[in-house]
Image: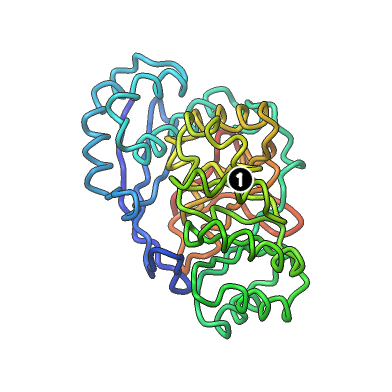
Amino acid sequence: MKLSYQVFDLPLKHTFTIAHQSRDVQDTLIVKLEEDGIYGLGESTTNPFYGITIENMSACLEEFRPIVESGKWETPKQLWEMGKVIFRNNPFAQCALDMAAWDIFSKKQGKKLYQYLNLDPKKIPTTNFTIGIDTVEKMVAKMKEVDWPIYKIKLGTEHDLEIVRELRKHTPSVFRIDANCAWTAEQAIRNSEELADLGVEFMEQPLGKDDLEGMKEVFRHSKLPVMADESCIVESDVKKCHGLFHAINVKLVKAGGITPGLRMIQEAKSLGMKTMVGCMTESSVGITAIAHIAPLLDYVDMDGAMLLAKDPARGVTITPAKVTFPDGPGIGAELL
């Protein structure tokens, strides 16, 4: 087994702004595992909010290289368990490796990943398309550029309700809003009343991740369902979110890959919570991996590659009506 990886700069079509950061380019690390002429690809983007860089992801992979290349593992789950200690502070790097392991593993089985997992691709929910924070005029222009049935609207400004009111004038599409920890409990409860009337489906992470008392109030009094994102990063967070959120958004890069992501989804379902998997502006490598497990979900946010001005890979094709997978087994994404 041979491990290698490449760094790519992913230019965005538009400056992407959320409550705590803006970016025009997203750095990403694409991992490759190769054996007997078969290869698998996985991906993780960098993230300054979580302190994740190309350098520290690469360092973790180098530390784990002897174990990966020893071949003393047969399944992605085994490899993931072997890497728990080394990757405990860098789940992003573990995610890229885990995706690559699932890709090469399912290719060796001669099955697409969703087939190996016994999932039905016809059950994939329609992804939302994300509109980052900007002037109202530019946010409207972005919606007109990509006509989509579901928009995720990034909020966290002093004029959040005004933004949603104005956007609603220009489309009948479903809205989901994501405040990225920017509100107080009082604001979230008050905002939920008008947002419900404006056709918003749910609110994602309205409060800071540690404001548990505030979330109890929001969960109790909000007119809209609330979804955890920053409050639900790793497996142990799922149970903590029960009774505070109606749903969880699993980010594979933050969780450590497909292996723990699948467990988080199943645990949330067992607790009666709805599930979503979100992206972190990955290329078609990471987005295609998400699509394979999307039949498990109530909601999905896999628009990352759609936000790019240039994609270094090809993989799943997404339209409002259909998700089309690449030919052949595995996850199936390929670098151009």
- Percent of width and height locating residue 176: 65, 60
325 lies above or below 257: below
73 lies above or below 55: above
Specify few, some or many for label 1: CA neighbours under 10 Å numbering under 14, 14-19, or 20 or more: some
- Percent of width and height locating residue 210: 43, 45
| Most foreground residue, 333 or 289 | 289
Label 1 belongs to which residue? 326
Q: Quadrant of the N terminus?
A: top left
The amino acid type found where label 1 is placed reads: Pro
Q: Residue at x 57, y 73 (%)?
A: 160
- Percent of width and height locating residue 212: 50, 43
Q: Quadrant of the C terminus?
A: bottom left
Q: Residue at x 53, y 67 (%)?
A: 155
Residue found at the far bottom of this picture: 137
Q: Under tag 1, what secondary structure?
A: loop
Q: How many marks?
A: 1
242 lies above or below 77: below
Q: Residue at x 72, y 57 (%)?
A: 201
Q: Residue at x 44, y 29 (%)?
A: 101
55 lies above or below 184: above
| Most foreground residue, 139 or 211 | 211
Q: Is residue 230 left or right of residue 8?
A: right
Q: Is residue 33 left or right of residue 299?
A: left
Colouring of the image: rainbow
| Most foreground residue, 172 or 110 | 172
| Most foreground residue, 82 or 184 | 184
- Percent of width and height locating residue 208: 45, 52
